Image: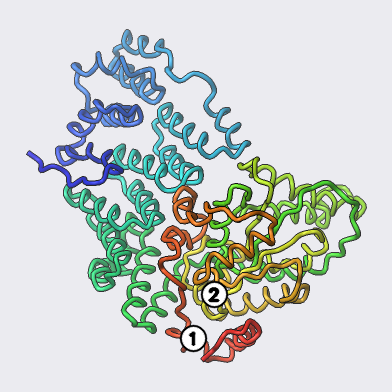
Amino acid sequence: MALPLPIKSDLLKPLSVLGSVQQGARAYYTDLRRSSDPHLVVAAWCTLLDGRLLSTTDWPQLLTQCGHGAVRSRAFGYFQELKEHGLALQVAQTPLTQSGDLQQRLMVAEAHDDAAEIAELHGALYRETGDLKHLLSASEQAERAGGWRPSLHWALRFLAAAPLNPSPVQRLYVVLENSGQPQLLQEVAEILLARNLHLQMSQVFLANAAQLRGEPERCLERLRGLSDAKLLADPALHNYLGPVRALRAAAYEKLGQYREAYEAYRLLQEGERDKTITPDDFVRGIRIRAKLNVPPLPPDDFPVVTQMLGFPRSGTTLLENVLAAHPSIETFEEIPDLNVAIDRIERVLLGKVPPEPPEATFAAARARYFEELAFHRRKPEATVLVDKMPIRSADAALISRLFPEWRYIFSIRHPYDVVLSCFKQRFSPNPAMENFRSIESSIRLYDIVMSEWFAHHTLDDANVCYVRYDELVTDFEPVTRRVLDFLGVEWSESVRDFSAAASNRAAKTPSYQKVRQGLSIGVQTQWRNYGFLFQSDAAKPLRKWADFFGYPVE
């Protein structure tokens, strides 16, 4: 008899179904049929039918489950194959328990950008089709809607439905990595190991848990058997190459082995590089847009939106989460609203739409920005709108002409720390973020972006509220009050609880794990430990900006 699973957290109780997984597919999925979760019931019958693991004694119960589309289609094929024509007809005549056009409902939900509804509809589509991709999509959309906890619920279903498949374990790792919960990472690994499942992947869970607990030696010990060569050779482990390299680098850093950490981060970025993207395309785009001649535009009644800019890893995610906790403020986190406006301009410039007067082009671009912003609104009671996209600082020339009424919150952090932090992150590939694959290209982009911004603004600009990251962390209330005064709203005690609120939001940037820890972790600075990276001629632009902002470089 198998030993009980080591499940302590209520959040992981759904994994109790793995108790019989070692007894073989028929035993496991026969047990799973008794689940109270209809998704797992569907998973059980689909797998038993696909594997032809049923006996005639199962047929009466099978017929009761044919209201699920995924079960019905498989049962029909199964009985047809056995020449059980009467049973096949009975299956074919069984009405579905889910009525309506699910694909249409999904499209409508996507048109409304209703992530919670999209997640539920992917669950319904799984019950209709039995396609596991819908459980993955449900987990991803649930995170967008409400953070890691609802996403975890779907990820656990995904794993229970296909416990031998590596994809659910990979998704579960992503969810728990975003959560920053070492005890959950540890417990999932222990559950998997107790049933001899995904042994090597479990070591990554344990390594991450050790790293989060401040045990870098234990982290490296867990990773010792997961060399790059081994991960690259096994398709089931290939997707762990980035996480393993990132954990290895962070462990070296924690141990004070900064040159080894730098080399590990360098390998991480080489592996993450997207060779289909040319980083210089982003810089060329900045310079082309800076030269656009925007004519004076007629007045409109669009709301004034405060932009939250700066540079990635300069403290914008922390401040955005603080402001998002205020009842009168709605923040928009890295949505493509300005890109939509720029696309409208480019369609004219590239001849994809009929020629029109420049005033019409740029007025339409403004309107498209506000349409996209309105599409993402979820807090109608808010009186102040804050749109966060730090890399947008690079387009200071265009936005100062296209949106002359805009006001700005601009985050400042030591340039060395900003560039170092950007280089260390696993950003999703895009033309801007591909510039962070090396220290040198990160420095170059920082210099370009700051030069563009300060060609149009000064440190004394009345329309810009400059916020230093280190002051926000160490002097939270006075700095936050100054920002709220700039926005024209009263102080609210709710802003102190920003870290708790952040747990219910999707991790759109790598900063979320630390934001969810609140201010207790203090100012994050590492540049002095990596001083050897900033001694070259390539680093001279950073020294210029450090001096400009009043930061030391020695």
**Residue 155, picture quadrant:** top left
Where disc 2 sits, the SS reads helix
Examine the rendered structure and indicate whether residue 551 appears above or below residue 196.
below
Residue 238 spot, x, y in % from top left: 36, 59
User: In the image, 215: left or right of 518?
Assistant: left
Question: Going 46% across and 56% down the picture, which residue do you hit?
Answer: 499
- Residue 533 has which mark? 1
Residue 59 spot, x, y in % from top left: 24, 16
Question: Going 20% across and 52% down the picture, which residue do you hit?
Answer: 190
The answer, for residue 460, to whether it is visible in the render is: yes
1 or 2: tag closer to the N-terminus: 2
CA gap between label 1 and label 2 equals: 13 Å
**Residue 520, picture quadrant:** bottom left
The answer, for residue 270, to whether it is visible in the render is: no
- What's the residue type where badge 2 is placed? Val
Local crowd size for mark 1, using a 10 Å CA cut-off: few (<14), some (14–19), many (≥20): some
User: In the image, 234: left or right of 327?
Assistant: left
Where disc 1 sits, the SS reads helix
- Residue 418 has which mark? 2
Residue 182 spot, x, y in % from top left: 30, 58
Examine the rendered structure and indicate whether residue 493 appears above or below residue 208.
above
Nearer-the-camera pick, 498 or 508: 498
Residue 476 spot, x, y in % from top left: 53, 66
User: In the image, 523: left or right of 469?
Assistant: left
